[in-house]
Structures are given as structure tokens and as C-alpha cells.
Image (cartoon, rainbow, N blue to C red):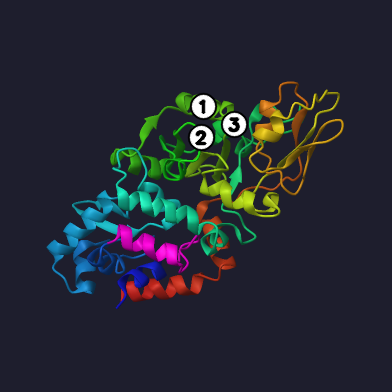
Amino acid sequence: MDWHEELRRKLDLFPIGLPRMEETMKILRLLFSEEDARIAAHVPNPPLMFTAKAIAGKTGISADDAARALRGMAERGLIVEQKFLVEFRYTLMPAVPGFLEMQFMKGQVIDEKRREAGELWHKALAGEFGEENYGFPTSGVRTLPVRKTIGAGQRVFSFEEADKVARASGSIAVAECACRKSARKCDAPLEVCMFFGMTADYLIGRNLARKLTPRQAAKNLEMTSDAGLVHIATNTKPPVSIICSCCSCCCASLRGVVSLNKPAASVASNFRAESATGSKCVLCGVCEKACPADAITMGEQRAEVAADRCIGCGVCAHKCPTGALTLVRKTNETPFPTSLHLTAKMMTERKKLGGLLESFAKDIL
């Protein structure tokens, strides 16, 4: 039995799965030993959570050995461990967003295995793994525009303002950007990815993230805007689980989008950039250089924005020294009400619901 392949099949049942590729199989073999893979292949997908004793009964090993292996995988950020009353329970976490990012958070020792896994992760994004992220109609993420770049007189909803989304999402933690640490292609700030609610509490409890107040979170968002990073959040109304501050050279959320012919169709946004009324463009090229989606070119009289590439992040307008660019509303789409609604939609598009239910039945019986 190829236990790494069995594990991969279960991981492929997440909304963003893990397709079989040379790179993804190498990642699993680097991070999970043969014994780890055998045990992890019997750990259920969420929301199911099993005790070490229950998992041991399915693998044929002792409860003590199973508990030791499960605790080790949880400490290495490979699976989720939660304590219920007096015993620990375990469930799988996806590759992305999930255990791949966990390998590069603050406090983790970046050894050769993790470094190689990071390189393979970014390589895989150029193939089927990237399609798994961005090749379907519903985007799992959306951009949150820089508030002050939205044109005057336009109504802005609270779910479109990053600081309000952060305040409405419960506990707040900030962690180092795993994409940037693993890709190592730029010197943008590292401690920028914010997590919320139960995810924040889990990461704080494992010393992988630092707790923030709402005011500190607002300052972090301001700092990352000034650094030219793009705010990308879960495509739901608050509470969201994450707001990343992304660059297009390192970050998984943007790299795949930018490589597509029409990135505007691959990430949810209600805005697009255009020339501001009465403003004077001096053709300095600052916006063209700052745009993470390669959506801007210098025309004869002003900067020109390609509508099918603009992701509505506002970085160009924030960096423009003359105020020649602004964000205008292109749609009035509302994010999904909850993460459950978003997950159901993504699973349906990827035709995974049947496979997940079969996996649940196999795990329970």
C-alpha cells in the first residue's frame, strides 16, 4: 500500500485539493514519514475529529504509538490537534491554505526538508496545483481595496474595508508570510498575514503567531498598504479566517492569478482602477511598476488600465504621486454569507462532494 498516495487522495478532497503530481508526492514524502503517512491516511477530514485510540484501531498499531505519532505531526504543523474535555482529537488540514504554510511560520526551524518542500510547492503552482487554486469559477479569496483609493461619493460596504473586516472577525493574530519565506524573491515585510477567530487562537496557542489588538491590526494593514502589498481575504462576509498581505512574486494567492490571461476573473473584487476625474497624469510610471497584476501601461497621455487584468486592490492609486488614479465600483457582488456556503460552492464546482461523503462513511464505519 502506498500510504502517501492514500493520504494525498484524502487531502485532494478539500476545496483546494492536492492533485497527483511529481512535486506534490515529493512534498508528502519529505514532510510525512512512511509511518506518519500510514497513520495520517486514517485521520478524518474535517469536521470529523477522532481520538488517537480510534485512529489506532484503524491502523493496527498501539494507541500509545498512534498518540505519539499524531502529537508529533501536530507539533510539526501537519495535522490539527484539539483538546476536548480530557482527550485530544485529530483532523486533517489541507495543503493550502494549511500545512504547507505552517512549515514556514515563526518558530519553525527551516531545515533542508522544509526548504525543498517550499521550492516544490511554488513549482507545483505552475501546473495542476495552480489550476486547483484558480481554475474554477468561484474564487476562494477576494481583494480588500485600500480604502482611501476609492473615489469620492461611492458607497463602500463594511465587508469591503479591511480594518472593519478585521474588527468584526474575533481574535486577531499576525504571523510571518509563509509564501515569502519559502519563495525568498523579495524583501517585503514578513510579519503581515493576519488570522482570526479559532484559527488565530490555535496559532497563538502553538506560538506560531502573535496576538494583535484591533488598533494594532489597523496599523499592520496601513503598513502593508504603504509597502505596496495586496490585501486578500477569505471570500466571505465577516468573520473571515485570514487577511493576507500579498506580493505577486512570492505569494500563492497572487502568483497563479497574475499568470492567467484574465486575472480579474480569477479573484473576487467589486472595484477596478481608472483615471480620476480632473487629475493630471505625469506618466511617471510609478503605478505601472507598483501594479501586482501587470494591468497598467503608459499611454500617450496617461496611464491605461487593462480591465481584464485589474484586480481592484488599489495599490496603483495608493502609490500614485499626483492622485491620477482612483478605484471605481464595477459590481455590487456580496461575498458568501459563511465559510460553509463558500466551501459547498467550491466543492460542487470541483465535483468533490460525493468523494468526501464516501470518505466520511469509510472513516466512521
- Magenta segment boundaries in residue numbering: 12-32
Residue 91 placement (x, y as % from top left): 33, 59
Q: Is residue 77 visible?
A: no
Task: Give the amino acid type for the residue marked by disc 3 in the picture.
Answer: Gly
Judged from the image, the secondary structure of the residue bearing numbered disc 3 is: loop
Quadrant of the frame with the C terminus:
bottom left
Please name the residue that numbered disc 1 is placed on: 218
Judged from the image, the secondary structure of the residue bearing numbered disc 2 is: helix
Task: Give the amino acid type for the residue marked by disc 1 in the picture.
Answer: Ala
Task: Give the amino acid type for the residue marked by disc 2 in the picture.
Answer: Ala
Q: Would you say residue 27 sits in the magenta stretch?
A: yes
Asked if residue 3 is positioned above or below residue 239 in the image, the reply reads: below
Q: Is residue 360 visible?
A: yes
Label 2 vs 1, first from the N-terminus:
2
Q: Would you say residue 305 sits in the magenta stretch?
A: no
Residue contact at pointers 2 and 1, CB within 8 angstroms: yes
